[in-house]
Image (spheres, rainbow, N blue to C red):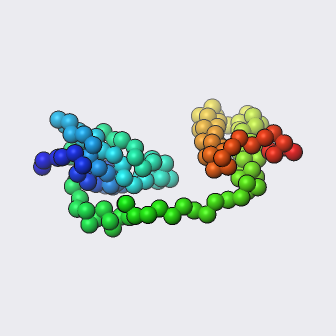
Amino acid sequence: MEWKTGMKVMYGRTNGQKTLGEIIKVNSKNLKVKQLESRGVQKNHRIGSIWNVSKELCTPVSDMLVGERGVGKTFTPKPSRSDAEIIAELQGIECGLSPENLSCDGEASRTHVMRTYRRLNRRKAECIKELGREPTFDELWG
């Protein structure tokens, strides 16, 4: 198989999730592939991520399949939430980040605490980005 830059491929393990991508660089054993659709159980790998993929795990695809999978179609954003709804979620996140709640009053393992801390902080950053500004103390606790 001759691999070329710009070629569309499906990549992933044989019995795993397959993802649509575009080759951006061809190396001797691997391909650098730009992800064209979301990937992961919770869709946590964003579109545009670059992956170093073994050539054995890639299969070329036709442009017809690219259209079927919805890549390149217009994106319709979800209706945005009101500021009050976002701030209510941020209040819940801040409560979850308190030491008592985060550590389950000292009962949770360090691994659980850190995993929860990172997840809540990621969600907090997403909410702040959606709000478009940092909420004031009075908005959160007033």
Q: Identify the residue at image location x=47%, y=62%.
A: 75
Q: Is residue 80 visible?
A: yes
Question: Residue, x 67% and y 49% (percent of image)?
Answer: 131
Residue 90 horizontal/vertical position (percent)? 72, 47
**Viewer-proximal residue, 71 or 133?**
133
In the shown orientation, is residue 3 left or right of residue 75?
left
Q: Residue 103 vs residue 38: left or right?
A: right
Q: Residue furthest right?
A: 142
Question: From what the image shows, is residue 12 above or below residue 69?
Answer: above
Question: What residue sits 17% from the left and 46% below the top?
Answer: 3
Looking at the picture, tell me which residue is in the foreground, 51 or 128: 128
Q: Position of residue 141 (x, y in %)?
A: 84, 43
Residue 61 in the image: above or below residue 46: below
* Most foreground residue, 38 or 132: 132
Q: Is residue 47 left or right of residue 114?
A: left
Name the residue located 34 percent from the left edge and 41 percent from the top edge: 51
Specify the quadrant that holds the C terminus.
top right
Name the residue nearer the viewer: 58 or 34.
Answer: 34
- Where, by quadrant of the figure, is residue 121 drawn? top right
